[in-house]
Amino acid sequence: MSYFMGIDLGTSSLKAVIINETGTVVEISGSSYSVICRKNGYAEQEPESWWQALKAAIGALKKKNPQILDAVAAIGFSGQMHGTVLLDKEYQVLRPAIIHCDARTEDEVREIYRLLGAEAEKILMNPIATGIMLPTLCWVKKHEQKILEKTKYTLLPKDYLRFRMTGTIGTDYSDASATLAFDMKKGKWAERVLEKVGLPVDIFPPFGDSAMICGAMTEEAARELGLKKGIPVVLGGADQVMQSIGCGAVSPGQATANIGSGGQICIQTGEAEANPKLGINTFQGYARDRWYVMGAMTSAGSSLRWLNQILDQKDYDEINKQVSEIKPGSDGLIFLPYLSGERCPRLNGDISGVFWGLSYLTDRARLTRAVMEGVTYAMRSCLDACKKAGAEIYSMTAIGGGNRSEPWLQMQADMYNVELKTTLHQEQAGYGAAMIAAVGIHYFPDIQTASKEMIRYKDRIIRPRKEIHECYEEYYRLYQEIYEKGQATLEAVTRLGRR
């Protein structure tokens, strides 16, 4: 029996997943870490915390099943997108990583648009937003010039972990295309863009397909992690791509609705559906000729986690029970989930969250349901933007932590007005990373074959309810109206709070 490991580096935790050749999850373990918020709007993490989380996760696996680690045939990676890790010529980390939910670079975003003009849309094919590597590097150049001068390599988060494991520097098409420093039409780093913004091209890593073997486990890493020396390691990919692979969404028209720390509607397409004005992203998938369109929101599951911490809610079964007892619309309470700005379709880092419609009737259950609904309104906005750009949907799979909540699943089906299916396994990103590892060592000839052999779905289909959909349509209109009519005020309050 062959075994494959997928490592998923998320925003709040790392998961290590081991699957066998039939697609059964054999072992899974995880370890969490925190986001550092030194100032309002900042979001950073120490790369060393990721490495320690990896050691902890693999250590836990070793305690449960030591023999399985010796049987791992290949390792793949999935990682949070857009983040920036800076290394010097000695491969030492120069500063904490600035990650995707960081909102400090609004000025840099505006400056990049000014410098690039019409070339921004032509070359990048995407909106420029905070938290993404290009504006982040421009911020470092402006505010921490000495750090940039010492920078020899700039890496995405998962690529730093893989470097620690193999000693090789590199990235894949999916993560490279999501930096805004990559020319997807030409398939190389965007030298013209980098020249205009004053960034050196030589700090960016080499790249390849997600299934490409980029190195092997070094003796030092094997000793530290408790794994075998020489295990082949593939490049892996952005978490959105690995999640799609991990639930079988690998062909045009197949879509995923992911509620993790952030949230994304992702639709596989036959070609690029570029329309930056709608706030959507068009990125490359696991290979040079693969594409997907995505609408992304910044604070999805993290909005619920924020509320749960404030309310000291820990029992998710009880949370779901209470939420199920509240009628759709939370008795007139609407939540705007902009705790760290927003991406699609708002493209605004200078906004913050809002509860609208508080009353003496408002309690824990209504606040909680309103947060779930507010996140789903934002996801619906992403779905509408993708459709408006021309993306077509033939099937949708719900993934991420949000699919573990029955009321939240039903809210999504009702609000999107589509049928949702779910996979038997829960960790889609780590699962997809393990699948890409199997393809990398040619256990399967391609991703499509691996998907057919490994992916299984639950029997239950979550179907929309017509009357509830109609109710949500009215609330959704009001959700949009609150932002549109209150945008200037919301921006002013947000900026005031960041002084």
Image (cartoon, helix red, strand yellow):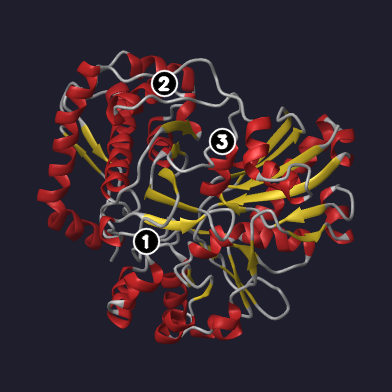
Q: Establish if 423 lies above or below 31.
A: above
Separation (CA) of disc 3 from disc 1:
33 Å
CA distance for labels 2 and 1: 30 Å
483 vs 284, nearest the viewer: 284
The crowd level at tag 2 (other Cα within 10 Å; few <14, some 14-19, many 20+) is some
Q: Earlier in the sequence, mark 2 or mark 3?
A: 3
Quadrant for residue 128, please give it: bottom left
Q: Nearer the viewer, residue 54 or 128?
A: 128
Q: Residue at x 54, y 42 (%)?
A: 250
- The residues tagged by marks 2 and 3 sit, at their Cα atoms, a distance apart of 30 Å
Q: Look at the image and tell me in which quarter the C terminus lies.
A: bottom left
Residue designated by label 3: 248
Q: Residue furthest left?
A: 485
> Which of pointers 2 and 3 indicates the residue nearer the eye?
3
Looking at the image, tell me whether mark 2 or mark 1 is earlier in sequence order: 1
Residue drawn at (42%, 75%), measured in percent from left and top?
139
- Is residue 11 visible to the viewer in this orientation of the structure? no
**Which residue carries the number 1 mark?**
103
Which three-letter amino acid code belongs to the residue tagged 2? Ile
Q: Nearer the viewer's eye, disc 3 or disc 1?
A: 3
- Residue 187 vertical position relative to residue 373 in the rendered view, above or below: below
Q: Residues within 10 Å of mark 3 (few under 14, many from 20)?
A: many
Give amino acid for label 3. Gly
What residue is disc 2 on? Answer: 319
Left or right: 465 in relation to 431 = left
Image marks 2 and 3: residues in contact by CB distance under 8 Å: no
